[in-house]
Image: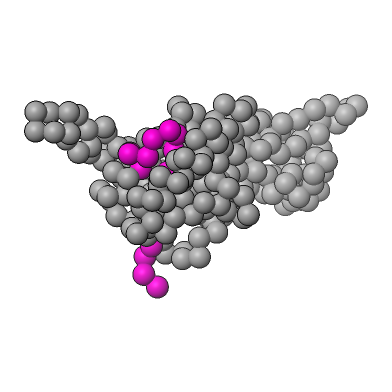
Amino acid sequence: MKNDKVHIAMVGNTVENIIAGINAMGATDLYPIISEKFWLETYDELKSRLSNIVELHDQLKGKKLKIDPFKDDSFITMLEMIIDIVESHPNKNSEFWINITGGTNLMSAAAEAGAVLTKSTAYYVVEGVETKKGPKRGSVIVLPWHSVNPLGLDKKRKQILIALNENKIGLSNKGIIDLYTNDFTSRSIVHYLKELERAEYITSYRDGRNKINLITPWGKIALRIIKL
């Protein structure tokens, strides 16, 4: 099977940077994550201008690839969309490229984070300038950090996240130790839990004398990332 070149693009009210990226880099598939305010007009324009060049996808898992870029939880939602696209693509040898140019600042930030976490290649389209000879075509800057793994999740940290993900009501420190009797002590578990809580992968609350630990949405994202 050939290597597909899959582009994921954040899209606001213009498609010019998306088209410039596709023309410059080449692509077989395009998944545009579009601000819901501009969904209809923007998607229609992409379809009319790119349908003969790439396979254009308008939804994933039965849901349209649109986002409200101003909601509190939209950063996590966009990360999940990017992970879903990478995870579900049928060709596991695909190259994944993420255009971070379009949409709001939050959309660009989510695209950058998604590129790092899925080890995709992020790129930015620099807008062309008007000259006496006409408009100058914009250039593409490929960002260098797509192979970085910032999560720092070793075996023991993964074990804790897996245990909390499988126990929806949370686990006490002792509950985690009981699952992995050979890996944690009452002292070492505190160290790992503090680290994971500082990273916002887990949260906790007091239930009498027990501290109950729960996985956060960011922790769930981390678990999905390490499986890619």
Q: Residue at x 90, y 27 (%)?
A: 208
| Left or right of 123 in this view: 220 | right
Check the image and name the residue furthest to the left. Answer: 133
Q: Of 127 and 187, which appears nearest the observer?
A: 127
Q: Residue at x 80, y 28 (%)?
A: 205
Q: Residue at x 52, y 51 (%)?
A: 58
Quadrant into which the N terminus falls: bottom left
Q: Of 201 and 136, which appears nearest the observer?
A: 136
| Left or right of 204 in this view: 70 | left
| Picture coordinates of residue 214, whole percent (x, y) | 75, 37
**In the rendered image, is residue 165 in sight?**
yes
| Picture coordinates of residue 190, whole percent (x, y) | 71, 33
As displayed, is residue 10 above or below residue 97?
above
| Left or right of 71 in this view: 38 | left
**Magenta extent:** 1-18
Tell whether position 2 is magenta.
yes
Q: How is the image coloured?
A: one colour
| Picture coordinates of residue 84, whole percent (x, y) | 56, 51
Check the image and name the residue furthest to the right. Answer: 208
Q: Of 88 and 225, which appears nearest the observer?
A: 88
**In the rendered image, is residue 192 in sight?**
no
As displayed, is residue 89 above or below residue 8?
below
Q: Residue at x 9, y 28 (%)?
A: 132
| Count of numbered circles on the image | 0
* Residue 61 position by quadrant: bottom right
